[in-house]
Image (cartoon, rainbow, N blue to C red):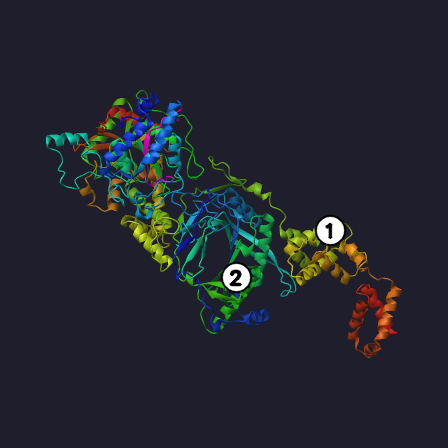
Amino acid sequence: MHSIHIPRIQVSFFRNVKFSFERVSKREKTSLSDKQIKSKTGHWQSVVGLEIHAQISSRSKLFSGASTNFGSPVNCNVSFFDAATPGTLPVLNRSCVEAAVLTALALSCKINAVSLFDRKHYFYADLPAGYQITQQRAPIAEDGKLQFQVYTPSIHKKPYLKSSRIKQLQLEQDSGKSLHDSIEKSLVDLNRAGVPLMELVFEPDLEDGEEAAALVKELCLILLRLNTCSCKMEEGALRVDANVSVHQPSEPLGTRTEIKNIGSIRGVANAIQFEIQRQINILNKGGVVINETRSWDPVYKQTLPMRDKEEKQDYRYMPEPNLPPLRLLIEGQLIPKDAKNLVNVTELQNRIPELPEETRRKLIKQYGLSSESAIQLVNEDQLLQHFIEIMKLEGRDAQMIVNILLIHLLTTLNKNKLSLEKCSVTSATLGEIVDLLQEGRINLLIAKKVLNEVVIGNSKSPSLIVEERKWIQITDEDEITKICADVLKNNQKMVEQYRNGKTKLFDAFVGLVAKHTDQRANMEVVVKKLKMLLQK
Amino acid sequence: MLGSSIRQIGARLRDASVTSSELCEAAVRRAEKIKELNAFVTVTKDVAFDGAQQSNFRFSKGKPIGPLDGVPIAVKDNFCTQGVQTTCASRMLETFNPKYNATVVQNLLDAGAVLLGKCNMDEFAMGSGTVDSFCGPTKNIWRSKFDPSVQKQNASGDGPNSQDRHDWHIAGGSSGGCAVAVASGAVFAALGSDTGGSTRNPAAYCGLVGYKPTYGLLSRHGLIPLVNSMDVPAVLTRTVDDAILVLDTVAGWDAKDSTSIAIDERPACIVNDQNIQNICVGIPTEYHSPGLSEEVLEAWNIVADIFEHAGAKVIQVSLPHTPASIACYSVLNQCEVASNMARYDGIEFGLRSSESESSDELFASSRRKGFGEVVRSRILAGNYFLLQRNYTKYFVQALKVRRLIVNDFERVWSSGVDVLLTPTTLSDAPQYKDFIRLENQQQCVMQDYCTQPVNLAGCPAVSVPIKLSKNGLPISLQLIGKFSDDRMLLSVGRFIEDAVKFPRLNLND
């Protein structure tokens, strides 16, 4: 509603408010190699619990009409309320409540018909009111569960299903941002102050960083389906705190540390793995793990103690007196007689779209994909959409499409340093390449070349490209036999070596034929013919 | 002219025997005349003249907006007024110039009322005397040199000894500036705020009607809070009728205040001479507190008798938890104060000290310089009560007691009582020199004894002046009504007003 422009606040601060992180000392330095961690972990058990802050995709803030647009000029999305101007009062944003309920339902939470708001007090320059409005006593939802597949191809041979309980989901305000851009001054940007957050508190049900990363990934997929959070971690739209401890199997849980504000999914895995190993190293040397807050340095790949949280805070929680209890309409539960315009939970339940796990099941059942392929496809929504689109034409080979998308398209993009988001190749184009392959008009090597063409911007159709470049596959067996015979004739020495037992050379012959035919030969036939000729 | 009621002055504006501008000029002159009483923090002369001129125009077209068009009013300096500094009588907000109007202020301006000024108060409304203000105390107009009876005594040589500079009476508080502004005739009505009696108390000491509406009936948007769960914008006028006019203008649901409620649309049971026998007046025995003065007790009896003679049913009732109320009120008050005051850190608005060692140092020194001692001590106490280890012992306990107090009222209402009749204050207005013998907090415990339980319960109350004490100072009584039953309550107030014929102050021009 109101938007005021607060001039850049220049405060002559600060020596001790600057976040300065102690560089980790040598004795704590550990290698990040996963194998090493596994062998060293040995008898130690690690326990991981996550707290995730997800900014709700709403147009306006949780308690004010100011915009939530990311990247607006400094201090332009600030209402009087957001600046804690005296006399202003919070007014709850209905769409944020709906987003929280929708999310909670998708995570099998129990929705509370009545939830409450509380003030959490601490002094900080980017917290204008001196307190954050949150839901400490009675959150909007509790007791949920998130199931997810853990599968990092470089680490796990097989995916496995893991589940983490959700203690609670609560609505709360984001804080502003402090910019300590010089020794002399600090600047405060309140654009983020009051942006709606869902805080999801998970039980410590995880064992390592990969499980944590997989949980975060699955949560992102769900939130994106629900359209309740953009999950752009690079913009801080989703932030992860991890509680980590290690202990001996027969003993109670160890002292935990909290890693704050991890900004990427790989960061979650790496930070936790590092922290587990750091704690194990300390304990193995007879040391003591201190209960502290640490940050993750993605450049140096280590967690470091955060100085500004040294003292234990007493947040002096108090009920927020300006917000009446939040009531929701739940089927079968009593409605207070004066209640009107309540958010209808049952209605929202019906608005939940297909969730990722359901999609995976469908992919496996309908198209016969492996669970690995299903997981990978669902992880990349754009590829999933391509897959579904390409499969609309009957008779196409699902596994071949999966290979084109998950292996060859990604490799081609990688080679050209392009991201999937920026790839404008249409499903129709990809489908045509699949058809050319399936019909035997081109082989896989040519398919990759065609992929490369369309990825770097050739707008002609794959058939036309193949035609123009004369990339049509050579399938004529006599022709191939002749080429193979020529290749062998020109490499008598190698043939002799091969026949004397150096069978590894077979691939070299295949390669030579491929090269000789500009990679156009049908390789299956080539292999068959070469074997035949060499046996003679 | 300045001493008349809103209805009377409205009639004169309509028949053009006076214009809004003339009225405004007279009001500004009156405000200047009583300057030494320190009723105003800011006299908004220019805003007032502008407003009056626009009102002139509407009257000249024959199209006034309503009964408040052209009527000079004032608001306590804790209501945000766009473009007019709003200080809360604190150094912290000395330069605070809001960019928006409080909803109730906007409603008054939309009705054509003329804003004459912002009134003095205890710092952030923490007090009951209007003595703890960064711009000095407000003095009661009664028994001051402006009081016609004092002028008469002076003329005959037996007036009060004006040599003693503390020999004056407090106006009550924390809305003391509003009370003096209305009592002096400078304005016809003022908006105060009432958290534990802050409007009823000065109204009682200044011989005015002080009406504390049902919690939520008037929007708090733009009222700088003391205790959010008890604060209400409240009305000071010279007559009950005037209070009703202001209520009708400012009340109503406000999207900007989630605790606001719609005006009850049910036809109110209006009490008058004819149907007074249908009502039941409760006299709560617990309000007969040890410190109650003989004269207030006498007034209490007189009015109870008036009710009885008029045919109303008058019964003794019990609100057994009243003695625990003030302690409960203190704890909740200080906890919310600690929280509400946390925003004054010198960053976005308000006083910022030049401290640059660190942000924590900046916060600390801005707050040390900006807040008076009363405010600082309440913040300290409140934060202590809210510490994790103390929360259950103090805050939760206070909430439980609050529930018992609400239940006390509920029980009385369900037993058939329509209104409660109690003292507003324990005595007439104390002299400043006596008042400051006790600390602010101790004074509040005494001063708010009869008024704060109502704030804990949220129900409406009105203080009505009854008679003069032998010192020549007003003595008032309080009527308490059921939640949302404001109109019925005010009609009972009018019945009393008519019956007692309180001798209102009428300043010579």
From the viewer's perspective, is A179 left or right of A163?
Answer: left
User: Which is more toward the observer, A182 or A213?
Assistant: A182
Residue B7 in percent (x, y) is at 32, 24
Provide the residue designation for mark 1.
A428
Let me know if residue B284 appears in the view.
Answer: no
Of label 1 and label 2, which has the lower sequence position?
2
The single residue placed furthest to the left in the displayed view is B157
Which segment did they paint magenta? Answer: B62-81
Which residue type does callout 2 highlight?
Val
Residue B309 in percent (x, y) is at 25, 23
Residue A522 in percent (x, y) is at 82, 63
Task: Answer above or below: position of A243 versus B492.
Answer: below
From the viewer's perspective, is A418 left or right of A125?
Answer: right
Query: In the image, what residue occupies the spot 29% across and 24% down?
Result: B312
From the viewer's perspective, is A201 left or right of A430?
Answer: left
Asked whether the residues under marks 1 and 2 belong to the same chain, the reply is: yes
Task: Tell me the tag on residue A48.
Answer: 2
Q: Where's the N terminus of chain B, which quadrant?
A: top left
* Parent chain of label 2: A
For mark 1, does the 10 Å Cα neighbourhood hold few (<14), some (14 to 19), or many (20 or more) residues?
some
Query: In the image, what residue occupies the spot 16% across and 31% down?
Result: B151
Which residue type does callout 1 highlight?
Ala
Secondary structure type for disc 1: helix
